[in-house]
Image (cartoon, rainbow, N blue to C red):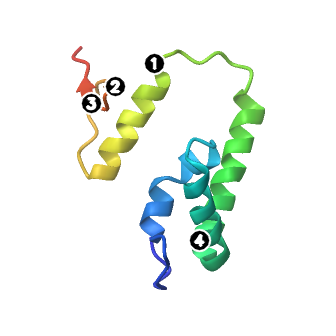
């Protein structure tokens, strides 16, 4: 997605790292770049607002549930596969601490 306008930080970069921004998992300098981008780009600001609302809803509805420790790596592995344009396998996908993706065979 892109609004078609030139920005210092490209729309695709902002959207690729939106959850890192929402989860406060990026350096302050990158957060500042994203905040500037949201001030300039209404489509990205709208997407940010939507994802922020979904995140709050999930937290409210599911925030007390214990999450299995490997769930985050499985979800991130699938997201990375989808972003890279690869087919998502039916088996479990995990990401090691080095960023290496592996598919668990059943």
User: Marks 1 and 3: in contact by CB < 8 Å?
Assistant: no
Could you say which disc has been placed on residue 94 in the image? 2
Q: Quadrant of residue 74?
A: top left
Per the image, the residue denoted by label 1 is 70
Eye-nearest disc, 2 or 4 = 4
Label 2 vs 4, first from the N-terminus: 4
Per the image, the residue denoted by label 3 is 101
Tell me if residue 41 comes above or below residue 19 in the rendering.
below
Name the residue at the front extreme.
29
Residue 99: x and y in percent read 31, 32
Per the image, the residue denoted by label 4 is 37
Label 2, label 1: how many angstroms apart (C-alpha)? 8 Å
User: Marks 4 and 3: in contact by CB < 8 Å?
Assistant: no
Label 4, label 1: how many angstroms apart (C-alpha)? 33 Å
Query: Which residue is pictured at 42% across the width and 27% down the height?
Result: 73
Crowdedness near tag 3: few (<14), some (14–19) or many (≥20) residues, C-alpha within 10 Å:
some
- Horizontal placement of 35 versus 82: left or right? right
Label 3 vs 1, first from the N-terminus: 1
């Amino acid at each position: 997605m892109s609004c078609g306008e030139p920005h210092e930080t490209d729309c695709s970069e902002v959207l690729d790292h939106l959850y890192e921004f929402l989860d406060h998992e990026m350096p302050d300098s990158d957060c500042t770049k994203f905040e500037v981008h949201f001030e300039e780009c209404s489509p990205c600001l709208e997407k940010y607002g939507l994802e922020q609302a979904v995140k709050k809803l999930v937290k409210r509805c599911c925030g007390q549930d214990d999450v299995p420790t490997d769930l985050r790596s499985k979800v991130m592995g699938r997201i990375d596969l989808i972003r890279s344009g690869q087919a998502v396998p039916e088996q479990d996908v995990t990401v090691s601490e080095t960023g290496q993706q592996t598919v668990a065979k059943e």
